[in-house]
Amino acid sequence: MHPSDRQILIDVSRLIWRSWRGNRATGVDRVCRAYVRRFRAQSLAVVQRRGRYYILNAKFSELLFELIIGGVSDFRSRFLRLSVLAFSTARQRAPRDGMFYLNIGHTGLDEPSLPKWIARNRLRAIYLIHDLIPLLHPEYCRPGEEAKHRQRMENVLKSAHGLIGNSQATIDDLAYFAGVNGLQMPPAVAAWIGGSEISTSVTAKSFDRPHFITVGTIEGRKNHSLLLHIWKNLVRQYGWDAPLLVIVGQRGWEASHALAMLDRAVDLKDHILELGDCDDLELASLIAGARALLMPSFAEGFGMPVAEALQLGTPVIASNLPVYREFAGTIPTYLDAIDGAGWTSAIADFTGDSLERKRQLQAMSGYDVPDWNSHFDQVQEWLAAIDGGLDTR
C-alpha cells in the first residue's frame, strides 16, 4: 500500500506514556495494541501532547508501531532517538479530509481542543468506549476522575462519527448518559473484546491445598475487602485446612482497607498469595488449577478474566452484573456483591465437588470465548454499513 493510501489515524498516545513509565499492560493497553496490530498497515500514528496533535509519516509510524507493541526493554532511549527524527515535521503534517481517527484508549478525550481538531480537519472519529464507571460509580475512582470522564464522554458524543462499545452494557450506559444530558447518541456497535491467546497445553498450577483466584487491580470497585474478610473467617474456622486465595493484580486506588489487611492482618499471612506481576502463561496456569475464579466487583466495563476462566474450564463465582450475563450467560454462579454469607457458602461448597460446581463444569463445555477475529469482523461489518468501512487489506 502506498503511504498516501493510508486512510486511518490511530492515536497511540496512551501506549507511549504507558511504555515510557514501564507499566505492565492493563486490559485497556491490550485492546489498544490489538488495534495497532490490526490496522498498522493502513495507519499513520497520532501522538497528542498538551492539545497539540502530531501525525507521523508512514515510515516513522511503522517504526513507532513496532516499538510500542514489541515490549522492548529499552523503550525510553529508542523512543527518544525516534522522536528527534519523527517529530520535527509531524506537527506541520495535516490530515487528509475524511480520514478515520481511531482513539481506543480514552487518552486525551477530555482535551477541549479534540472536537475542534476533528471538525476542522473533517475527520471521521471512531472511539472505543471501555466503561462509564467514573460517572456511575465515582466513589470507587480517584478524586477528580468523575469530572474528567464527564468531559471525555461529552467530547466523544459531540465529535464521534461512530462508537464501539466493549459490551452492550457499556453502550447502554453511554446512551443513558447522552439522554440525560441532551446529547445525540452517534451510531454505535457492541463488540466484545478478545483476551490473550491461551495455549491448549496449559498446565494447571496446584498448591498444597485447594486455591481460589481473583484477577484485577486492587481497587475499591473490585471488592477485595469482601474476600479478605471471608478468608479471615475461613481461617478462623478451618485453620491450615482453609483454601488459599491467590490475588493477581497491581495495587491501585481507593482500596486502603484491603491494602491494610494485606499488609497487617497476620492471620491471613499464610493463606493469601498476592502477585502484583504475572505473565499470561503463569496466570492461565493459576486460573486453570483454581477451584473457581472469584469476581465480586461492584462495577465492570467488561471482565475478561471471566471469559478466560470459562475457556480454561474453571468455574466462576461473580457479582450479578449485566455485563457478565451478557457474554457468560447462565454459566457462572451469580451473587450480590455485598452478600457475604452467600459468598462464604459458595466458596466453601466449591472447595469440594458441590452440585453447583459440577453444573458449571458441564455448562461451560464448548463455551465460545470472545476473540479478536470476531471483534474486528463485527466492527468491519458495522463500519461498512455506515459509510464504506475501513480497508484492512
Image: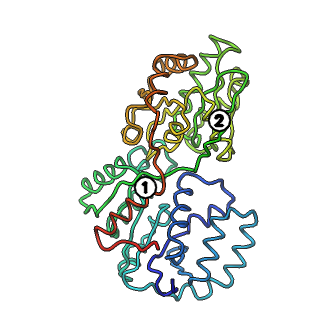
Given the image, on which type of amino acid does mark 1 rest? Answer: Ser
Tell me what residue is drawn at x 59 percent, y 64 percent. Answer: 15
Tell me what residue is drawn at x 43 percent, y 56 percent. Answer: 375
Q: In this rendering, is residue 30 above or below 259?
A: below
Secondary structure at numbered mark 1: helix
Report the front residue among 269 and 63.
63
Q: Earlier in the sequence, mark 2 or mark 1?
A: 2
- In front: label 2 or label 1: 1
Q: Which mark is residue 286?
A: 2
Residue 80 point in image, percent of width and height:
71, 76
Q: In this rendering, is residue 80 above or below 210?
A: below
Residue 171 point in image, percent of width and height:
33, 52
Tell me what residue is drawn at x 68 percent, y 28 percent. Answer: 272
Q: In this rendering, is residue 58 above or below 105?
A: below
Residue 263 point in image, percent of width and height:
70, 32
Asked if disc 2 and disc 1 are in contact, CB closer than 8 Å, the reply is: no
Q: In this rendering, is residue 342 above or below 388?
A: above
Residue 251 point in image, percent of width and height:
63, 43
Please state if 196 lies on the left or on the right of 144 as rendered.
right
The residue where tag 1 is placed is: 374
Please state if 181 lies on the left or on the right of 285 as rendered.
left
Secondary structure at numbered mark 2: helix
Report the front residue among 272 and 311.
311
Mark 2, other Cα within 10 Å: few <14 / some 14–19 / many ≥20: many
